[in-house]
Image (tube, rainbow, N blue to C red):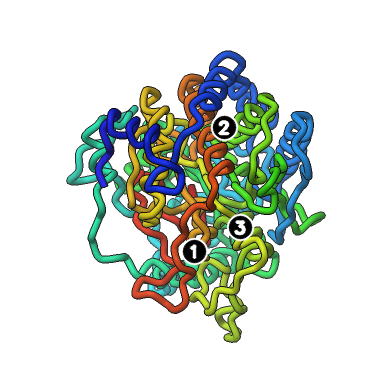
Amino acid sequence: MRSIPLHALVACALAVPAAGLGQTVDLALAGRIRAEAVERSQVLDHVRHLTDVLGPRLTGSPGLLRANEWTREKLESWGLERARLEPFEFGQGWEFSRCEVRMIAPQLVPLAALPKAWTPGTTGAVRGEALFVELESEDDLERHRGKLAGKILILEVERPERPGGRGEPPRPDFERYDEERLEELAEIDLDEPRGDAWRKRARKRFAFGRKLAEFLAAEGVLATVERSSRDLGILRVGGESTRRDPALPRGVPEVVMAAEPYQRIVRLLEKGEKVELEIAVEASFLADDSKAYSTVAEIPGTDRARELVVAGAHLDSWHAGTGATDDGAGVAVVLEAARILRSLGVRPRRTLRFALWGGEEQGLLGSVSYVERFVADRPEPTDAAELALPRGLREPTWPIRPKPEHGRISAYFNLDNGGGRIRGIYTQGNLAVAPIFQSWLAPLADLGATTVTNESTGSTDHVPFDRVGVPAFQFIQDPLDYMKHTHHTNLDTFERLQREDLVQASIVMATFLWQAAQRDEMLPRKPIPTQPPTAPAAAEPEDRSGAASARAAGGQG
């Protein structure tokens, strides 16, 4: 479906009744939303506090818990009701307070590096000879057995090609969608689904990762060093979050180094030079509370109060930056939409619920837990080997079993593709909502939000809702420098955000929430899956927005 010209959208919005293909838009309220968002915006204040004051918000860390409490108090201060923290089982948290890496020989040089999350710390500063190795298979482990004690390993890690890699034009440093690109996004991709190949690869990586961690510790390796997947000194860092389970091997300290000093070390080693490194990492595992939390609050409805319209973004972040574009921007927009609608003094027909998820980066854990508790679940696997795997790596079980909220949620709207302004929305293949969304976008066209695509996108918190047949959607956003520079990197800070984009996104979010809350009928929904499709339901659709693909045991959007 291609984007529709403005004059056609306006005609649809103003002339088609709610029971028809589109929906009559409350233009008076849309105007009030816009005025409040533009003239009295607080969205930049929200994200400044999240990033500059509260800082990184790794799931299970004190930083995320502080953000949970602050957002709950903020929502409560605006008069939202039932403001609360929703717990989910997580395991041990982790935080670090020091990471210093130096080359000692052939020169004394400080090197830019950060620890991977859930890595153990060093015992003081450790020094060792650097050794360049590839440890990608069990054969590699056997080849190096007995040779690595006291060494600091410079790991050669196979990395998939990313846009702008070899054979492709480089991704622009800063990108906004033009009309041609929006039309491409609106076209349906009829390529063969990816199937479950991703799960097989992820399960293989998980199994080998456990063996590698045990091997490195048994061999007496001091630490490992990996190359950042971004150039220009950018540190892109995640972590093996399965190590939050104390029953799994934690291996040795692991750091990610900026590409340029890493490559220098590799060149020195390739020329036969002896390289000695010193690494000091202070990190601790937090065992006081095995739970992490999502923040939830709501504006009660009136005549349809039992029915829900939900807005969401993820509150957690990785630890290299302060989580501004991933996903402080989305959190700030959801907060601002709540503030706007509450400040207008209007009462929606349906209850508006606002959810700020924890654990998104470790596999959508907060939203998955919420769906399983209140919306729909699946039977637990009966096979012991499946139960031993992280949830995201298990084969899906059947049937899907709806719970009370399943039939009460009219829509879930998510924002998590960076700090760019909203340009439209993905329907996740729900064709019946497309003309409705077109009519809602009509009064927003002058703000650049025009495109409806029947494509699906994955890797973030609308997916658990969509998988069980609840209407759930992610907005299309301008990419800006999200995938090029900020996604999971030390550059993900307040400086990467633009006020105008966040104000625009707040207007779109508040408008969509209000329209969904006021509609006579609930939004159309796809059937609940009843049998395994050709491409398993747990497999993510291709993410055409450019955001990272879902990784079952690793990072998300």
> Residue shown at 56%/82% (left/top)?
385
The circle drawn on residue 467 is 1
482 left or right, relative to 253: left
> Residue shown at 61%/29% (left/top)?
336
Q: Secondary structure at mark 3?
A: helix
Using the image, determine if residue 282 lies above or below residue 459: above
* Residue 120, horizontal then vertical, whole percent: 65, 53
Which of discs 2 and 3 lies nearer the camera? The answer is 2
Residue most toward the bottom?
Answer: 383
> In terms of depth relative to the viewer, which is nearer, 518 or 405?
518
Q: Secondary structure at mark 1?
A: helix
> In terms of depth relative to the viewer, which is nearer, 468 or 61?
468
The circle drawn on residue 365 is 3
> In terms of depth relative to the viewer, which is nearer, 183 or 523?
523
Residue type, mark 1 in image: Arg
Residue 210 visible from this viewpoint: yes
Q: Which residue is mark 2?
A: 333
* Residue 293, horizontal then vertical, whole percent: 72, 50
Which of discs 3 and 1 lies nearer the camera? The answer is 1
Using the image, determine if residue 292 lies above or below residue 62: below
Q: Earlier in the sequence, mark 3 or mark 1?
A: 3
* Residue 171, horizontal then vertical, whole percent: 28, 36
Residue type, mark 2 in image: Val
Residue 122 visible from this viewpoint: no
Quadrant of res 337: top right
